[in-house]
Image (cartoon, rainbow, N blue to C red):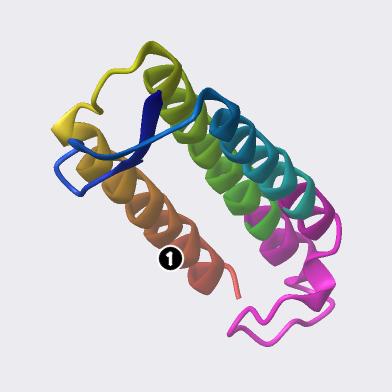
Amino acid sequence: MIPGHYNIAGEIDKYSSKNSIWILIVVQILLFTMMSVLERFPNIWNTGVKITEENRERVYTNLRNMQTYLKMMIMIYFSYMTLQSIAGERLNSISVFAFLILIFGGMSIFLVKIFKNR
Protein backbone atom coordinates (compact mmCIF):
# COMPACT_ATOMS: atom_id res chain seq x y z
CA MET A 1 0.00 0.00 0.00
CA ILE A 2 1.13 3.53 -0.82
CA PRO A 3 -0.38 6.96 -0.08
CA GLY A 4 -3.35 7.50 -2.38
CA HIS A 5 -4.43 10.96 -1.23
CA TYR A 6 -3.07 13.82 0.84
CA ASN A 7 -5.03 16.49 2.72
CA ILE A 8 -4.19 20.20 2.60
CA ALA A 9 -1.66 19.76 5.43
CA GLY A 10 0.20 17.12 3.42
CA GLU A 11 -0.90 14.26 5.68
CA ILE A 12 -1.87 10.93 4.18
CA ASP A 13 -5.63 10.41 4.44
CA LYS A 14 -6.05 7.46 2.08
CA TYR A 15 -3.94 4.48 1.08
CA SER A 16 -4.12 2.71 -2.27
CA SER A 17 -2.49 -0.22 -3.99
CA LYS A 18 0.94 0.23 -5.57
CA ASN A 19 -0.64 0.05 -9.02
CA SER A 20 -2.47 3.34 -8.37
CA ILE A 21 0.82 5.23 -8.77
CA TRP A 22 0.33 4.82 -12.51
CA ILE A 23 -2.77 7.02 -12.34
CA LEU A 24 -0.68 9.92 -11.05
CA ILE A 25 1.93 9.35 -13.75
CA VAL A 26 -0.69 9.13 -16.52
CA VAL A 27 -2.37 12.33 -15.28
CA GLN A 28 1.01 14.07 -15.26
CA ILE A 29 1.74 12.94 -18.83
CA LEU A 30 -1.72 14.04 -20.01
CA LEU A 31 -1.35 17.46 -18.36
CA PHE A 32 2.08 17.92 -19.90
CA THR A 33 0.79 16.96 -23.35
CA MET A 34 -2.29 19.18 -23.20
CA MET A 35 -0.30 22.15 -21.89
CA SER A 36 2.34 21.65 -24.60
CA VAL A 37 -0.33 21.68 -27.30
CA LEU A 38 -1.98 24.81 -25.84
CA GLU A 39 1.41 26.49 -25.64
CA ARG A 40 1.72 26.25 -29.43
CA PHE A 41 -1.58 28.06 -30.14
CA PRO A 42 -1.69 31.31 -28.14
CA ASN A 43 -4.08 32.82 -30.69
CA ILE A 44 -6.97 30.68 -29.35
CA TRP A 45 -6.58 31.96 -25.77
CA ASN A 46 -8.84 34.58 -24.30
CA THR A 47 -6.21 37.09 -23.22
CA GLY A 48 -8.34 39.95 -21.93
CA VAL A 49 -6.19 42.19 -24.12
CA LYS A 50 -7.07 43.38 -27.59
CA ILE A 51 -4.52 41.84 -29.93
CA THR A 52 -3.22 44.24 -32.58
CA GLU A 53 -0.41 43.99 -35.10
CA GLU A 54 1.76 46.16 -32.81
CA ASN A 55 1.34 44.10 -29.61
CA ARG A 56 0.76 40.60 -31.03
CA GLU A 57 4.35 39.34 -30.68
CA ARG A 58 4.85 40.78 -27.16
CA VAL A 59 1.54 39.46 -25.83
CA TYR A 60 1.93 36.01 -27.39
CA THR A 61 5.53 35.75 -26.15
CA ASN A 62 4.41 36.57 -22.60
CA LEU A 63 1.54 34.08 -22.87
CA ARG A 64 3.88 31.33 -24.06
CA ASN A 65 6.33 32.14 -21.27
CA MET A 66 3.53 32.01 -18.71
CA GLN A 67 2.34 28.66 -20.06
CA THR A 68 5.89 27.28 -19.96
CA TYR A 69 6.34 28.50 -16.38
CA LEU A 70 3.03 26.98 -15.25
CA LYS A 71 3.82 23.71 -16.99
CA MET A 72 7.20 23.54 -15.27
CA MET A 73 5.75 24.27 -11.80
CA ILE A 74 2.99 21.67 -12.24
CA MET A 75 5.43 19.01 -13.48
CA ILE A 76 7.81 19.67 -10.57
CA TYR A 77 5.00 19.37 -8.04
CA PHE A 78 3.51 16.25 -9.62
CA SER A 79 6.98 14.67 -9.66
CA TYR A 80 7.41 15.55 -5.98
CA MET A 81 4.01 14.00 -5.13
CA THR A 82 4.84 10.87 -7.13
CA LEU A 83 8.19 10.42 -5.39
CA GLN A 84 6.64 10.98 -1.96
CA SER A 85 3.91 8.44 -2.76
CA ILE A 86 6.45 5.87 -3.93
CA ALA A 87 8.45 6.40 -0.74
CA GLY A 88 5.24 6.16 1.33
CA GLU A 89 5.89 9.50 3.00
CA ARG A 90 3.71 12.50 3.70
CA LEU A 91 4.05 15.74 1.79
CA ASN A 92 5.80 18.64 3.44
CA SER A 93 2.94 20.79 4.76
CA ILE A 94 4.54 23.92 3.36
CA SER A 95 4.82 22.40 -0.13
CA VAL A 96 1.12 22.80 -0.94
CA PHE A 97 1.15 26.47 0.01
CA ALA A 98 4.47 27.09 -1.74
CA PHE A 99 3.07 25.46 -4.88
CA LEU A 100 -0.04 27.67 -4.81
CA ILE A 101 2.02 30.80 -4.20
CA LEU A 102 4.37 29.93 -7.08
CA ILE A 103 1.45 29.20 -9.42
CA PHE A 104 -0.68 32.26 -8.64
CA GLY A 105 2.30 34.55 -8.07
CA GLY A 106 3.83 33.56 -11.39
CA MET A 107 0.52 34.00 -13.20
CA SER A 108 0.10 37.44 -11.64
CA ILE A 109 3.56 38.56 -12.76
CA PHE A 110 2.97 37.39 -16.33
CA LEU A 111 -0.51 38.92 -16.48
CA VAL A 112 0.83 42.28 -15.32
CA LYS A 113 3.46 42.08 -18.08
CA ILE A 114 0.79 41.25 -20.64
CA PHE A 115 -1.40 44.19 -19.63
CA LYS A 116 1.61 46.54 -19.63
CA ASN A 117 2.57 45.42 -23.16
CA ARG A 118 -0.86 45.86 -24.71
Point out the stretch of residues depicted in magenta: 35-62
Say which residue appears at 79% left-offset and 61% top-offset.
57
Above or below for 91 versus 71: above
Quarter of the image that includes the C terminus? bottom right
- What residue would you read off at disc 1? 112
Say which residue appears at 35% left-offset and 57% top-offset.
104
Q: Is residue 81 left or right of residue 94?
A: right
Above or below for 22 versus 86: below
The question of residue 99 being in magenta is answered with no
The question of residue 52 being in magenta is answered with yes
Nearer the observer, 78 or 20: 20
Element assignment for label 1: helix
Q: Is residue 100 left or right of residue 53?
A: left
Instruction: Where is residue 49? Give x, y as percent.
Output: 61, 83
Instruction: Where is residue 63? Give x, y as percent.
Output: 65, 59
Q: Is residue 114 left or right of residue 59?
A: left
Instruction: Where is residue 66? Give x, y as percent.
Output: 58, 52
The image quadrant that residue 77 belongs to is top left
